[in-house]
Amino acid sequence: MKKINIIYDFLSELGGLERVLFFMGNKLSKEYDTTLLFSFIDDDFKKEILKTYGLTKNIKIIEIQNGGFKNQSWKLFLSLINPGKLLQHNADLMISNSFLCSVMCYKNKIKKGIPYIVFLQHPPNFLYPPQNLKGWANSFPRKCAVLLKILFGDYLKNKDKIAVRNADKIFVNSENIYKKAREIYGVESNIIYPPVSDSFKKIDDKDAKSFIKRFNIKNKFILTHGRIIPDKRVDFIIKAIKEIENLDLVISGTIGEKLKENLLSLANQNGLSERVKIIGKISEDELVGLYNLAEAFVISAPKEDFGLTPIEAMACGTPVIFWKDGGGPCETVTEGVSGISAKPYDIMDLSNKIRFALESNLKNKNRKEIIKSVSKFSEKEIGKKLLEEVQKLLPK
């Protein structure tokens, strides 16, 4: 059986990219000997990730930079200055999911002739920032990345472009990233959307309420979910619901204590302390329940590269409110059917669009059409295309 290594920087959080990596691993393992490689693995969090996303038992998970430093940033740095470390892990094909991994794969190809695919989830933000770089650098690893850009920006951009342009195939996750790949790298690519899990679907309200019973949610609510970090600008949503009566905001997903305190303080300042509920990490059943019962899902991140959570919401029949700023939801949400766009970063217009979605009963009026609109993101369809593209490069 031919061997494929799927490579990414770290395994340390629950997010859309991690879900995609595990999906690829499970799908490709049906035809190939498949391994997931990471520069850094958080052993304490690994069990929770495996439990949440599931992984076929015969797939191995290996840390490239094993031993030595325990710090994530240092291990990523070691991978950058010593990309040859990947040479120890033989395969017939490598699939890179980041700048760092693409650099390692390129060196591997030069040394050992191993072909590789670059799956461009997005161009590296620290080299090609989608927004203000100072605002983006809101964590220690990101501050380190910015320092590298300041000191070695041109050199790293050159390495990035060489690595991407020499890939045997390039996958991107959306039309949005397809355009960025042409603009930055001058390359053509294949669009393979992130799949929405079959778990996300319309269920009976009775079942949905039983899933979220512990949260004691009694009023109508809108939902935002994901890896809640400052970039996602959840503060926009809190300010937007101030003018809408009898509507709560539920915020779920991983969130740091400092940001949680800041958001709760903002809610209190706006007289919304009883209406903003931050419930943190939740199970998949609980998330399905929230998606089904929410009046709308709101994605507030500026210029989101793709955005899997809006698709999960739509798979449950819930409309999406999003910015009309050219980000991923502009591609995946059908205006007026499965969602409504707001003027970029205009809080009053966001408030008006949320109110309109509620007053027009968009959810109940269009529920069947909303669910139907995400059929192209099903695991079956995406898995089929992924296998077809990989087999062109690596026949069984």
Image (cartoon, helix red, strand yellow):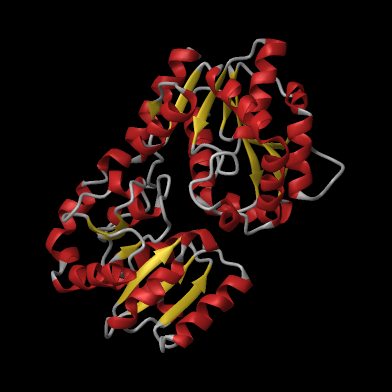
Quadrant where the image shows the N terminus = top right
Count of numbered circles on the image: 0
Q: Position of residue 160 (x, y in %)?
A: 60, 28
Q: Which residue is at a point 34% across and 70% down the rendered structure image?
A: 347
Return the residue nearer the eye: 298 or 125. Answer: 125
Q: Position of residue 51 (x, y in %)?
A: 57, 53
The quadrant holding residue 115 is top right
110 in relation to 369, above or below: above
Report whether 83 appears left or right of 277.
right
* Residue 343 visible here: yes
Q: Which residue is at a point 18% across and 59% down the rendered structure image?
A: 367
Q: Which residue is at a point 40% across and 65% down the rendered structure image?
A: 224
* Residue 64 visible here: no
Q: Position of residue 300 (x, y in %)?
A: 39, 61
66 in relation to 219, above or below: above
Return the residue nearer the eye: 305 or 212. Answer: 305
The quadrant holding residue 85 is top right
Return the residue nearer the eye: 396 or 277. Answer: 277
Q: Position of residue 82 (x, y in %)?
A: 79, 29
Return the residue nearer the eye: 295 or 208. Answer: 295
